[in-house]
Image: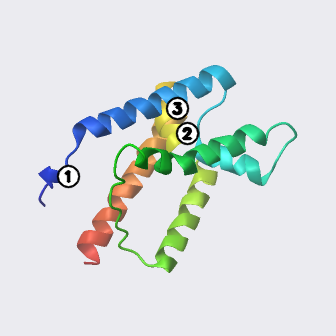
Amino acid sequence: MTIDWAGFTPYSALAGGLLIGLAAAIFALFSGRIAGISGIVGGLLRPKGGDIAWRVAFVLGLLAAPWVFATVAPLPVSRIDAGTGTLIVAGLLVGIGTRYGAGCTSGHGVCGLSRLSPRSLVATGAFMAAGFATVFVVRHLFA
């Protein structure tokens, strides 16, 4: 295994983490809600009165962020080494996992851990372990 030192960007990663934490804290402070993306999007699929506008604004903000970023810096190159079918299956599995786990990485990993939630600690540990195992199997056993 080698490390791509040219691609190692600790300062931008730190800045991104700080911005995510700050955004989650502000969202919780002003709305009293958790910034869990699966819950926010899921609420759009089962809308309740007076609950749609902020969810749509949140999702539109997520979608608009890359274009806003592109006005100040070039977007990083993304490379996806998977076919459409694999991406669809992976997306469905993630969706199923967020339902069984009662939340996603942003809900548990960012918001839940910062609130010292034991459930979020277990959930985050579980999806991190599953991710590690998946990468190991795909890169070392199927390679």
The label shown at residue 65 is none
* Nearer mark to the viewer, of 1 and 3: 1
Between the C-alphas of marks 1 and 2, the distance is 28 Å
Q: Quadrant of residue 53?
A: top right
Q: Residues within 10 Å of mark 3 (few under 14, many from 20)?
A: many
Give the residue pinned by disc 3.
111
Give the residue pinned by disc 1.
7
Kindly check if marks 1 and 2 are in contact, taking CB atoms under 8 A apart as contact: no
- In the image, 66 versus 38, the foreground residue is 66
> Which quarter of the figure is the C terminus placed in?
bottom left
93 with respect to 58 (left or right): left
Which one is earlier in the sequence, the residue at label 1 or at label 3? 1
27, above or below 47, in the image: above
114 with respect to 50 (left or right): left
Number of dots carrying numbers: 3
76, above or below 72, in the image: below
The label shown at residue 107 is 2
Point out residue 97 in the picture as x, y percentages from the top left corner. 56, 56
| Residue 39 in view, yes or no | no
| Residue 140 in view, yes or no | yes
- Mark 1: which amino acid? Gly
Between the C-alphas of marks 3 and 2, the distance is 5 Å
- Mark 3: which amino acid? Cys
Residue at figure coordinates x 35%, y 73% from the top left? 81
Residue at figure coordinates x 38%, y 37% from the top left? 16
Q: Residues within 10 Å of mark 1 (few under 14, many from 20)?
A: few
131, above or below 80, in the image: above
- Mark 2: which amino acid? Gly
